[in-house]
Image (cartoon, helix red, strand yellow):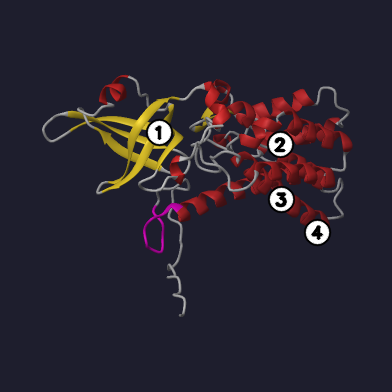
Amino acid sequence: MSDITSLHLLAPGEMGDFFALLAEKQVLATKDGKPYYRVTFCDAGREVCFPIWSDATLAATCREEWQAGEFYKLRAELRDTNYGLQLEIHRIRPVEEADREDGFDPLMCAARSRFDPEAMFTELMEIAEQVIDDEPLRELVTSIYEQYRDELLLMPAAQYNHHSYLSGYLEHVVNVTRNARVLTELYAQLYDELTPPINVGLAVAGAMLHDIGKLRELATGPAGATYTSAGTLIGHVLQGRDIVREAAVDSDIDEELLLRLEHIIVSHQRLPEWGAPKPPMFIEALIVHHSDDLDAKLQMMVTAISEESGEGEFTSKRNALRQPVFRGKLVEPKEEEE
């Protein structure tokens, strides 16, 4: 492996070989009307914007060969100028398949969950083993997860709005499953006289599979999640039911239990305008719906707070919730005593 660094690890004045995405290439003009390009190279931790002047050595190459949205291998020096950080490029070429041996990853620029995907996957499988008492139901859920393991480890939960980053799907599903487990166990104790009894295993199975149709709704790429044709035309709700039905063909699962699992999937969005053909019509389905809705809305609120640059008590309405979020008075950090 050659000596490869990362763009975000370079210190000003340092030269290095690294991979970067050409995120943007704009044609602009000077005050004298001379055209030039403003280019933006980035990795997951840094974005560097700078001009390529019309008389620069790389001007023709930039104009004719560089394509926004493509990855390149660069040898460049990071320079701290009066206009901010810029790159002085010494060598540049498009990435090649052999660059994977040097650590190139086409998903290198995509935002990722702050939680380890392998640990989240393991936690979900452990919850299934601990809580889903019905063996055919447990095997159905775990077999689907094992079949799609590689995709689930990387998938965002959405294209926009909530958990829309790599491994965001597992982060969301772990939260929904934890919520559903706790709530179902609570209400099963409060209403232990119900017949049939509230089924904690069914709620956990539904939580783990409520968004499974996103395997066919979304495609994961360098820019995050994009919609497939099937995702646009059908959506994840019905495709989730399809995946479960296909997996259950040779299963010994009880017919009514399977029907209830399918209902949790098709009703978890609750409203037709959100994509649900039916509202939740039994307790476990209602719990999964609210567990899902809570986690999505809470993550939207956290994002609104963390991305707001203002200093007021309220955020702006420019967020996924389309409403102000109350932060309260910002507390200045205390100075350490000498």
| Residue tagged 4 | 190
Across and down, in percent, residue 172 comes to 63, 44
| Residue tagged 2 | 209
| Residue tagged 1 | 75
N-term mark: 1 or 2 = 1
Q: Which residue is situated farthest in the top direction here?
A: 64
Q: Amino acid at mark 1?
A: Arg
Is residue 217 visible in the rendered image? The answer is: yes
**Residue at figure coordinates x 26%, y 46% from the top left:** 83
Mark 3, mark 1: which one is toward the viewer?
1
Mark 3, mark 4: which one is toward the viewer?
3
| Residue tagged 3 | 178
N-term mark: 3 or 4 = 3
Mark 2, mark 4: which one is toward the viewer?
2
- Cβ atoms at labels 1 and 2 below 8 Å apart: no
Q: Amino acid at mark 4?
A: Leu
